[in-house]
Image (cartoon, rainbow, N blue to C red):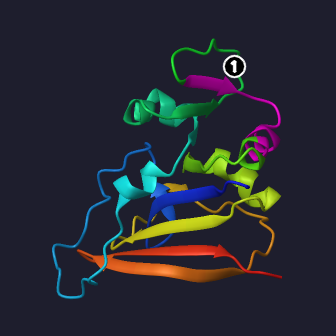
Amino acid sequence: MDGKIILNLAISLDGYIADENGGYDWIIGAGNNTLNTVEKWDYNKFLEDIDVVVMGKNCYDQGFHKDFTGKDVYIATSKEIENYENYHFINGDIVQKIANMKNEGKNIFLFGGGGVIDYFIKADVIDEYVIGIIPTILGKGRKLFLENNPKIDLSLQYYSVEDGIVVMKYSKRNK
């Protein structure tokens, strides 16, 4: 059975995943629960089904890899860095390497950042997009979707609202 490649990120209303300095302290709700849905997105439950986490070197340098001690973490980098513990440094055709893991039945979480994710979007290999829209307009920062992407048709599978944050889960539409 094939696994899945899943993008799961929070973005500002205007499409940024981080501020100009890579900061994410703006990723908070609006303090209003009047529109909350009964069902809530459960990030920890999501992580239970994940085998592999993929992130870029900037995310690694910010210490995000430490959040995934029980998972295989693959860090995309142009440098030759020695693997240690559950951390694997990869370069070259990272999309193909990760797609091979998916074909082995592994569920892969594309954690970030935008530069790494862009390769997967352009290759159209992402099976699910889980996007949390933060009720903030940043105005500038690091975008999720870079230029010249292919057209990818999606189907809404799930949504929830909590504290003004809308979480939507899309899967690729059957052709």
Q: Is residue 69 above or below residue 1?
A: above
Residue 153 visible? The answer is yes
- Residue drawn at x 34%, y 63% is 42
Residue 19 visible? The answer is no
- The image quadrant that residue 100 belongs to is top right
Q: Is residue 57 above or below residue 112?
A: above
- Residue drawn at x 81%, y 31% is 92
Q: Is residue 98 magenta?
A: yes
Quadrant showing the N terminus:
bottom right
Mark 1 residue crowding within 10 angstroms, few (<14) / some (14–19) / many (20+):
few
Q: Nearer the viewer, residue 85 or 78?
A: 85
- The amino acid pointed to by label 1 is Lys
x, y percent for residue 102: 72, 48
Q: Is residue 166 magenta?
A: no
- The image quadrant that residue 164 belongs to is bottom left
Quadrant showing the C terminus:
bottom right
x, y percent for residue 105: 69, 48
Q: Is residue 33 left or right of residue 48?
A: left
Q: Which residue is tagged 1? A: 79
Q: Residue furthest bottom?
A: 35
Secondary structure at badge 1 equals loop
Q: Nearer the viewer, residue 134 or 124?
A: 124
Magenta span: 87-100
- Residue drawn at x 67%, y 28% is 77
x, y percent for residue 4: 66, 57
x, y percent for residue 174: 77, 81
